Image: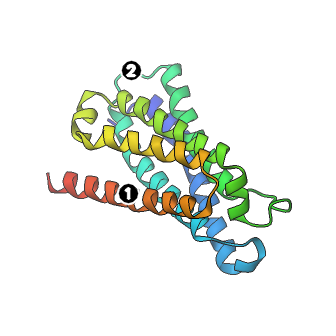
Amino acid sequence: MDSDPVYLHIRVVLSIILGLSITTLLRGLASIIEHPERRGWSWIHLCWVLWALISVVTFWWWEFRLGEVRQWTFGLYLFVITYCAAWFMLCVLLFPDDLRSFGSYENYLLQRRGWFFGMLALLTLLDLGDTAIKGHSRWQMLGRAYPLHTVLMLAIAALGAACRHRRAQLGLAVAALVYQAGYFLAEYFTLASD
C-alpha cells in the first residue's frame, strides 16, 4: 500500500500543504492568545477557526486512503494538490496578513464572506471527488450521513455568503463547528468499533 513511489511523492506534497494549513491556524490562534486586543477576536471567527482545524486534521487523517489508489495519473495528482491548496486558502482567509482596513478578524470575515463561504462550498464539492477517488467502498463506509453532510455544508456556505447579520453568522459558525465535531467523532467511533 505505501510502497508505491508515486503515492509516496504525493503524500509528501500533500503533507507540506496541509502542514502549512495547520501552521496558519495555530499561529493565528497563538497571536490571538498573545495579543487578543491587537487584531480583535470574536466567537464567529473563533468557531470557524476551530471548525477549520478539526476539518483539516481529519481530512489529513483520511487521506491515508489514497494509498489504495491503484493507478495514479497526473490528473489525479493535480486534483489532490488542488484540494489541499483549497484548504490552505481557506486557512489564510481566516488569518490574513493585513487587517488595517477591516479592524478585526470578524469584520474581515464578514466583509469577505463571499470568498470564505465560496471556498467552503468549493471544499465541500472537492470532497465528493476525493471520496470518489478512494473508491466505492469509501462511499459505502460513509453511508447516508455523507450526502446529508454535503447538503448541510453547502447550505451553510450559501446562507453564510448571503447573510450580513452577526447573530445569524454566529449561529452558522456554531452550528458548523458543533456539527463538524459531532460528525467526525461519530464517524471515528463508528469505524473504530467495527
Residue 16 at x, y = what percent? 58, 47
Quick one: which residue is furthest to the right in this view? Answer: 100
Residue 147 at x, y = what percent? 32, 37
Residue closest to the eye, 164 or 25: 164
Question: In which quadrant is the N terminus drawn?
Answer: top left
Residue 169 found in image quarter: bottom right
> Three-letter amino acid code at disc 2?
Gln
> Three-letter amino acid code at disc 1?
Tyr
Which mark is on residue 179? 1
Residue positioned 67% across, 51% down in the render: 93
Residue positioned 15% across, 56% down in the render: 193
Location of residue 170 with respect to 116 vertically, above or below: below
The reply, left or right, for residue 155 in relation to residue 28 is left
- The numbered mark, 1 or 2, whose residue comes first in the sequence reads 2
* Mark 1 → mark 2, Cα distance in angstroms: 35 Å
Crowdedness of circle 2 by 10 Å Cα count: few (<14), some, many (20+)?
A: few
Quick one: which residue is furthest to the left in this view? Answer: 194
Q: Identify residue for label 2.
A: 71
Q: Are marks 1 and 2 in contact (CB under 8 Å)?
A: no
The reply, left or right, for residue 116 in relation to residue 133 is right
Residue positioned 56% across, 64% down in the render: 167
Residue 98 at x, y = what percent? 82, 58
Residue 82 found in image quarter: top right
Secondary structure beneath dot 1 equals: helix
Q: Nearer the viewer, mark 1 or mark 2?
A: 1
Residue 184 at x, y = what percent? 33, 55
Secondary structure beneath dot 2 equals: loop
Residue closest to the eye, 12 or 34: 34
The reply, left or right, for residue 138 in relation to residue 39 is left
